[in-house]
Each structure stands twice: as structure tokens, then as C-alpha cells.
Image: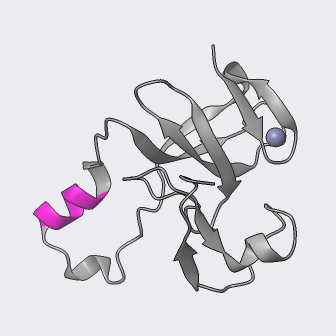
Amino acid sequence: MLLIECPNCGPRDETEFHYGGQAHVAYPEDPYALSDKEWAEYLFYRDNTRGLYAERWSHSLGCRKWFNAVRDTVTYEIKTVYPMGAPCPVDLRTGERIRTDADSGAEAGAGSNGSTDTTIESEVGR
Ligand SMILES: [Zn+2]
């Protein structure tokens, strides 16, 4: 059984949550311009990752809010949770934390300041 850290409510049992699929799948800018094949790929095709995977979760039996999580599909460990609309704070290929402007100021989860300036910081060797 997973213990999932809701950004609003704290750690809760996985039975309170609803899985929402892969995170960061952008809606097509012009959906009418897509072919049937491209539209089907947008609707149904998702990464099938072995390792770190960014996904959406809803705390459906709690605060009912959506958030993103980075979960390891091998161990089921949830590495981090972060607000909807925020960039993924972890490099999914390496597992390294990506430092954002939000890290230097307010506490994580305080919201996005709209900045897209990011730098990759290695946690190895600290
Ligand atoms: Zn919650």
C-alpha cells in the first residue's frame, strides 16, 4: 500500500487518491490541424517508463485537488510531489533535482512565479 504525500493534507493512504495518468501532456495548440493518427496519439499514447515517471494524482477522497508526483515505476517510491502547472522538479532520466527560482525563495509548493529559468543541480557528491 502506498502512502502518498498530498501537498495540501499531508501523507494519506493511496485509497484516497485517483490516478490521473502521465503529467505534462500538453493539449494540442490547434487540435483541428491534427490528423486522426496524431489525435489518437495525443489521446491514447503515453510513455511506458521503467523508472522515474511524472504523473497526475487527485486527492479525490480528501481535498479533491490535483497535483503532480514523480514516482519510480520499479519501486513505487514517490520521489516528490509538486503543484499542477509547475515544471517537473526532477530530471526523469537521471533522478537529479532541478533547481528552480522557487527553491531559492518561498517554500516549495508555494506556487509558481511564472519563471521558466531552471538549472540542473546534481545531488551526487554533496
Ligand atoms: Zn489533499
Where on the picture, by quarter, is residue 16?
top right
Q: Position of residue 90 (x, y in %)?
A: 53, 57
Question: Residue at image x 56%, y 53%?
Answer: 125
Magenta stretch holds residue 38: yes
Question: Residue at image x 58%, y 55%?
Answer: 123
Magenta stretch holds residue 43: no
Q: Splitting the image into four quadrants, where does ligand 1 fall?
A: top right
Above or below for 105 versus 13: below
Q: Position of residue 87 (x, y in %)?
A: 57, 68
Q: Position of residue 118 (x, y in %)?
A: 57, 79
Where on the picture, by quarter, is residue 121?
bottom right
Q: Position of residue 33 (x, y in %)?
A: 21, 82
Span of residues in magenta: 36-42
Q: Nearer the viewer, residue 125 or 122?
A: 125
Q: Nearer the viewer, residue 25 or 52?
A: 52
Question: Residue at image x 53%, y 52%?
Answer: 124
Which is the main secondary structure of the residues drawn in magenta?
Answer: helix
How many badges with numbers are in the image? Answer: 0
Where on the picture, by quarter, is residue 60?
top right
Question: Residue at image x 79%, y 26%?
Answer: 12
Quadrant the C terminus occupies: bottom right
Q: Nearer the viewer, residue 10 or 104?
A: 104
Instruction: Identify the residue at the far top of this view.
Output: 1
Quadrant the N terminus occupies: top right
- What's the image's color scheme? one colour
Above or below for 121 versus 23: below
Say whether residue 83 is left or right of residue 20.
right
Q: Nearer the viewer, residue 39 or 116?
A: 116
Above or below for 72 versus 39: above
Say whether residue 92 is left or right of residue 79.
left
